[in-house]
Amino acid sequence: MSIRKNIWMAILTIITICCVIGGTFYHTGIFEVNGGFRFGEDRMTSVSADLETFHAINVDADMMDLSIEEGDNFYLHGKYTDRLKFEYEVKDGVLFLKGRNPRKIFWGGVRGENCNITLTVPKNTVMDRIEIKLAMGNADLENIASIDCEVLNNMGNCIFEKCSFDKADIDTNMGEVRIKDTHLGDAEINNDMGTIQIERCTFQDLNVDNSMGDISIDAKQSLDQYEIELHAEMGNVRVNGENEGTKYRQSGNAGRLEANTSMGSVRLSDE
């Protein structure tokens, strides 16, 4: 029975990888019958601009490495391949960033496109909402506060350091999720393939789910009065260094922590 289960899990893993990669290539325009092959890199276009004051951020891009960090003012700068269509505007207090790849390439074409954008906001600024949707690329936030933060990344890493959210929803299909020294509030974190690492963080209610990869949670708070449910279907659970097998449960009413991985291990520690 165990061998059969492992075989099915391996098949599901292969299917998941193919679907994620295929979906990403289709969405970003890598695969299409027309267009042929293209070799080499395009020229780079630079962008820099002082921005109007805004209280929310909305990002929707096919391909972008995005950094949002603390700075002296509202400012945007970066570089992108000139074949990409990059747009930005502040409207009704919301900063909109859009990145599109208007051209298509035949199967297996070589691409040199890239887009690297850095956004700064003044110290002590609290956003009403941050919404980031990336088909491919990394999202890196440092020293950023927002009432609500939602990140959906199809292929790429999500990195947060010294941030603060009342509510957070972080979802990636393929990549790593790394969160350090951050208050997550009420949070949901999901990953289809890759590790989830939460280090020196605080939270009220936290739900973490990983299809294939390890989960590591280091809480910078006591969880003695928390309701906790941990499950590692094909791995083990360790709580404060103690091996708990594949499942761990604890009753409490101060908050809730739930972490599940289908293929990997769960590690939990608290103060």
Image (tube, rainbow, N blue to C red):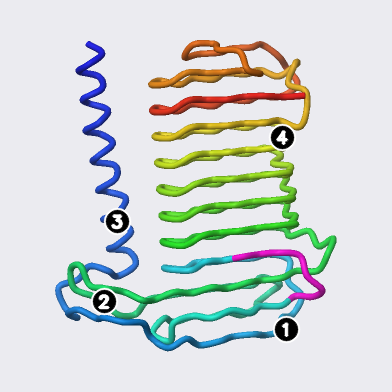
Q: For mark 3, what is the residue? A: 23
Q: For mark 2, what is the residue? A: 104
Q: Quadrant of residue 33?
A: bottom left
Q: CA distance from mark 3 to mark 4?
A: 33 Å
Q: Secondary structure at mark 2?
A: loop
Q: Quadrant of residue 207?
A: top right
Is 112 positioned to the left or the right of 162 in the image?
A: left
Residues at circles 2 and 4 in contact by the CB criterion of under 8 Å:
no
What residue do we see at 49% from left, 68% from top?
64
Q: For mark 4, what is the residue? A: 203
**Mark 1 or mark 4, earlier in chain:** 1
Q: Secondary structure at mark 3?
A: helix
Q: For mark 1, what is the residue? A: 50
Q: Residues within 10 Å of mark 2 (few under 14, many from 20)?
A: some
Q: Amino acid at mark 3?
A: Gly
Is 251 positioned to the left or the right of 8 in the image?
A: right
**Mark 2 or mark 3, earlier in chain:** 3
Q: CA distance from mark 1 to mark 4?
A: 34 Å
Q: Is residue 153 above or below residue 32?
A: above
Q: CA distance from mark 2 to mark 4?
A: 43 Å
List x then y, in percent, for residue 151.
55, 53
Q: Secondary structure at mark 1?
A: strand
Q: Is residue 145 above or below residue 269?
A: below
Q: CA distance from mark 2 to mark 3?
A: 14 Å
Q: Secondary structure at mark 4?
A: loop
What residue do we see at 20% from left, 18% from top?
4
What residue do we see at 29% from left, 56% from top?
23
Residue range (magenta): 67-74
Q: Amino acid at mark 2?
A: Lys
**Mark 2 or mark 4, earlier in chain:** 2
List x then y, in percent, for residue 30.
27, 69
Q: Amino acid at mark 1?
A: Asp
